[in-house]
Image (spheres, helix red, strand yellow):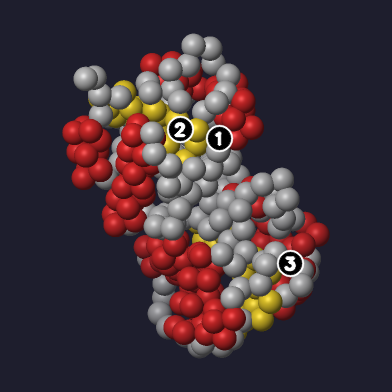
Amino acid sequence: MNKPKVFITRRWPASVEEKLRNLYDVTLNETDRPLTADEFKAALQQYDAVCPTVCDSFPTEVLNVEDKRCKILANFGVGYNHIDIPAAKANELIVTNTPDVLTQSTADIAMTLLLMTARRGAEGDRLVRAKKWTGWCPTHMLSSNVTGATLGLIGFGRIGQAMARKAHHGFDMNIIYYNPSAANEYVTQDLQAKRCNTVEEVLAQADFVSLHCPAGANTKHLINAQTLKLMKSSAHLINTARGDVVDSVALCEALKNKQIAGAGLDVYENEPHIYEGFLALENVELLPHLGSATLETRTAMGEKVLANLAAYFAGDTLPDRVA
């Protein structure tokens, strides 16, 4: 019996790739380069399953390609806003994702960015590497306290709550949040968290604002020129959620004009293209989408994809179906 044909758009951890080779007639992107729309179309025509990542774009144009063989897009990642879900449904394409396994690693990166922007970490590193540091003095590179400060979270799901635990129990931070629904009583008591009625209330009160909301029409440019004006001039913005939640032009202007103190970004609009204005600023910390980038987490994500593929080809209920 012929094995199902599976296409992997980028390289995965070696242990997961080995399992794929054993289970399927798999084709890997050996060069690990970003693929083109035409290459994605060809993959949909030639393979039973295509496994994209969050950096691969599957718009209507790609999904509408004729003579499709593919029936499932088994996504390597939690986010799936890079896939046109209505078009996938119209083309009878199943879409799955990899939830639950990247909570802690993404929260770790959010906390890393908070500490970096608060204490001007990357700026200090650049100073030392450039051999421009002349020694300690009382007023050099003054920054912001983290311990005891107020952390405001926009979105309070698994990752938001994980970051809140690290911040509250590790740095004695006060926790406020906005979420459409309230957290359960145990979480609220454990974190002494206060739910705000609006996003605007969080922005006005927080010393650090961390974004953990999903992408979508309701959250596109949620942080914009108007909402940035609500933040304290001493406040910092952290984004490990989705790039298009933040209006890059507006944030750059707010940072350049010292309207807010700083920002830490791991995700961007139009990745991997970063708004050029950020590159000239010292008060923004920039990471290359490292949220889930631990070997353990990326391996677990691959295992999730394997579980979804196995269920699909066995005709069983898919554990992580989103469309």
Give the residue at x 51% y 65%.
Answer: 158
Return the residue found at the far right: 226
In depth, the one of 323 and 190 nearer the eye is 323
Instruction: Write down the residue under mark 3.
Output: 199
In depth, the one of 278 and 154 nearer the eye is 154
Give the residue at x 37% y 21%.
Answer: 47
Q: Position of residue 129 (x, y in %)?
A: 37, 63
Instruction: Write down the residue under mark 1.
Output: 83
Dot 1 falls on a residue whose secondary structure is loop
Q: CA distance from mark 3 to mark 1?
A: 27 Å
- Quarter of the image with the C terminus in it: top right
Instruction: Write down the residue under mark 2.
Output: 73
Q: Amino acid at mark 2?
A: Leu
Looking at the image, can residue 32 be seen?
Answer: yes
Picture quadrant of residue 46: top left
**Label 3 crowding class (10 Å Cα cut-off): few <14, some 14-19, many 20+?**
some
Q: Nearer the viewer, mark 2 or mark 1?
A: 2
- Quarter of the image with the N terminus in it: top left
Q: Amino acid at mark 1?
A: Ile
| Image side of residue 219 versus residue 40, left or right | right
**Label 2 crowding class (10 Å Cα cut-off): few <14, some 14-19, many 20+?**
many
Instruction: Determine whether label 2 and label 3 are within 8 Å by CB.
Output: no
Q: Nearer the viewer, mark 3 or mark 1?
A: 1
- Figure check: 266 above or below 188: above
Q: Position of residue 173 (x, y in %)?
A: 55, 84
Q: Position of residue 54 (x, y in %)?
A: 48, 41
- Figure check: 120 above or below 101: below
Q: Position of residue 276 (x, y in %)?
A: 59, 45
Instruction: Determine whether label 2 and label 1 are within 8 Å by CB.
Output: yes
Ranked by sequence position, the earlier of labels 2 and 1 is: 2
